[in-house]
Amino acid sequence: MNVLNKKQQEKQKIFTIFLKKLDLAYSAFLIWRELQNPKYDKIFSKNKYFWLTAMASLFATSSVELAKLVERKNPKYDEAISIFYLLEIELYDYEETLKKIKKLRNKVLMHTSSKAFLNLDKFMKELNLKYGEIEELFNKLIEIS
C-alpha cells in the first residue's frame, strides 16, 4: 500500500467518524426540539424527573457534539475531527453562531463557570442562541458533508 492510499484511507475513516458524530448531534437536536412541543406536557408530568434528565441530556449531547464538529484547528493539540480539519473552508456566515456555541460549551456544558451557573437565565438570555441558528448550522454542515 502506498503512502497516498494510506492517507486517503485515513481521511475516509475520519470523514466517516465525522458523519457519525454529525448524525448523533443532529438527531439529538431534532428529538430535543420536537419534545419542546406542549403536546408532550401530559406525558412529561407523569415522570418529571426522567424527562428533565432526558431533555438536558439531549440538549447537552447536541450542543457539545456540534461544538466539537466546528472546533477550529489548534496547533498545540492533535487535530480535532471537525469540519475545519476535513475541508479547507470558512463558515463566515455562521461566525456569530459559532461564537455562541463555543461560549455555551465553554461556560456551561464542559466547564462549570460559577458566574454563568449562578445567573443561568441571564447567561442564556444574553447568549441569545436560537433554535433556528443551530438548525441552520446543522443544515450547512450536512450540505457541505
Image (tube, rainbow, N blue to C red):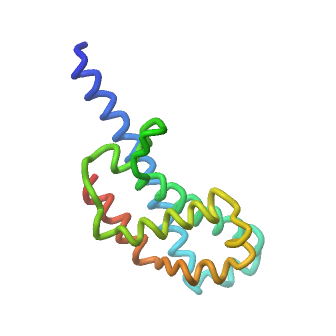
Q: Is residue 1 above or below residue 88?
A: above
**Residue occupying the far front of the picture:** 76
Residue occupying the point 77% across, 71% down:
49
- Point out residue 93 in the picture as x, y percentages from the top left corner: 29, 70
Residue 72, compared with residue 121, is above or below; it is: above
- Taking the spot 49% from the left edge, 66% from the top edge, the residue there is 101
Residue 37 in picture, x, y percent from top left: 55, 83
Expressed as whole percent of the image width and height from the top left, the position of residue 104 reads: 56, 67
- Residue 69's place in the image compared with 76, above or below, is below
Name the quadrant containing residue 80. top left
Determine which quarter of the picture holds residue 56: bottom right
Q: From this viewpoint, which residue is outermost toward the top?
A: 1
- Viewer-proximal residue among 125 and 60: 125
Which image quarter holds the N terminus?
Answer: top left
Residue 69 rendering spot, x and y as whole percentages = 43, 53
Residue furthest to the bottom in view is 38
Say which of 69 and 26 sits in front: 69
Q: Is residue 59 left or right of residue 74?
A: right
Q: Residue at x 27, y 58 (%)?
A: 90
User: Which residue is nearer to you in this view: 104 or 28?
Assistant: 104
In this rendering, the count of numbered labels is 0
Left or right, 35 with reference to 30 = right
Quarter of the figure with residue 2: top left
Q: Residue at x 41, y 55 (%)?
A: 70
Residue 75 relative to residue 123: left or right: left
